[in-house]
Image (cartoon, grey):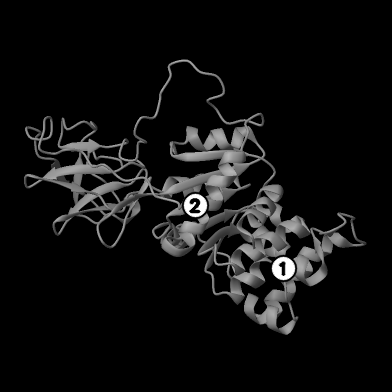
Amino acid sequence: MAFELRKYTAPDFTKEPFVSAPEAVLREAPKDAVAPEQYHAMSIYPEYFKIGGQWLLAEESRMDCVPVYEEGTVQVREPRRLKKGDKVICGRTENCEEGIYVWPFGFEEPGRMHETFAFRQGRSRETAFSRDYDAIYDLLRYEKEHGYILWVMGPAFSFDYDAREAFSRIIAGGYAQAVLAGNALATHDLEGAYLKTALGQNIYTQENQPNGHYNHLDTINRVKFHGSIPAFIEAEHIDNGIIYNLEKYHVPYVLAGSIRDDGPLPPVYGNVYEAQDAMRACVRKATTVICMATMLHTIATGNMTPSFRVLPDGTVRQIYFYCVDISEFMVNKLADRGSLSSHAIVTNVQDFIVNVAKGLGV
């Protein structure tokens, strides 16, 4: 059976309490980067605001940002981007009391049973994930033709030959439209292609190599010598790996820097807000997000990603968000941060990506 997106059901604004709800309150930002008192903070869900007698949907949402009324639309802006005089929507209630309505049930499955008490409702190492894998295969095949698949990756993939090869085939197969990562993933993946090691350990046998602790530094140094990753790939005849395939198939990637980075590689963003902007440019297009073995990047991406996307034709569709990690703490941490639409898979990410590649037949 062909994959089908869940249909979105909007609220019925012809009924109460929408009809008699007051207009949303607009207050001007008092200074650049400062919101007025009682500003409204956005969530991951569709949110509507009553302005001029109409309920307006904020089409590009982001958690912890503020809604700004501008030229007949509701724009969602990071507080650091506010300008003095921006008309910020204010109010701390979410059920029409202040002309604000948060709608978390737009993608509810009809007839879905909710039990007050039931076993195995959480996600843990004991959970059977077979159906999750089947769902991911169907989803990715659909998204390859109709959506935008964003992968968020920790460095674990670069330490294993099979995982590097599996994700390389996923890229080549057209199942990646963008990748978010850090300096470590790129460094050790390029080290694997250049010296066949990751942090000095052979990526196939896992045996430590003599003086191997120099290898990632030598790789960074050589990339800097050539001036860029593409120049390094060409000059050193690199022909494998994740970064090689991202470059080969022109898939954009964002490498966000960290205080602990070695080097870093030339394209790594050292300014955290520039990195955030570059990441959000990819998130704004994403319809499926799969985060794997990177707590900080996953939480950052989760905070940027709403539960829905408004397509050019006005259709509201669901964004699918997966968090894959061997740590139960990690996947629960994401939910604790408010990313309630995240779907957790507790497993070794190297095994996960190899299984996904096999399931997709790439």
* Real-space CA distance between mark 2 and mark 1, rounded to the nearest whole angstrom: 30 Å
Q: Secondary structure at mark 1?
A: helix
Contact, mark 2 vs mark 1 (Cβ under 8 Å): no
Q: Earlier in the sequence, mark 2 or mark 1?
A: 2
Of the residues tagged 2 and 1, which is closer to the observer? 2
Which quarter of the rendering shows the C terminus?
A: bottom right
Q: Residue at x 20, y 35 (%)?
A: 91
Residue 292, given in percent of the width and then of the height, sits at: 60, 49
| Pointer 2 local density, CA inside 10 Å: few below 14, some 14–19, many at least 20 | some
Q: Which mark is residue 139?
A: 2
Residue under the point 49% across and 52% down: 139
Q: Position of residue 73 (x, y in %)?
A: 18, 55
On the image, which quarter does residue 160 sit in?
Answer: bottom right
Residue sitting at 34 percent across and 34 percent down?
Answer: 110
Horizontal side of 44 relative to 101 (left or right) equals right
Q: In the rendered structure, which amino acid carries the disc numbered 2? A: Leu
Q: Secondary structure at mark 2?
A: helix
* Total count of labels: 2
Res. 265 visible in picture: no
On residue 190, which mark appears? 1
Residue at left offset 58%, top offset 58%: 181
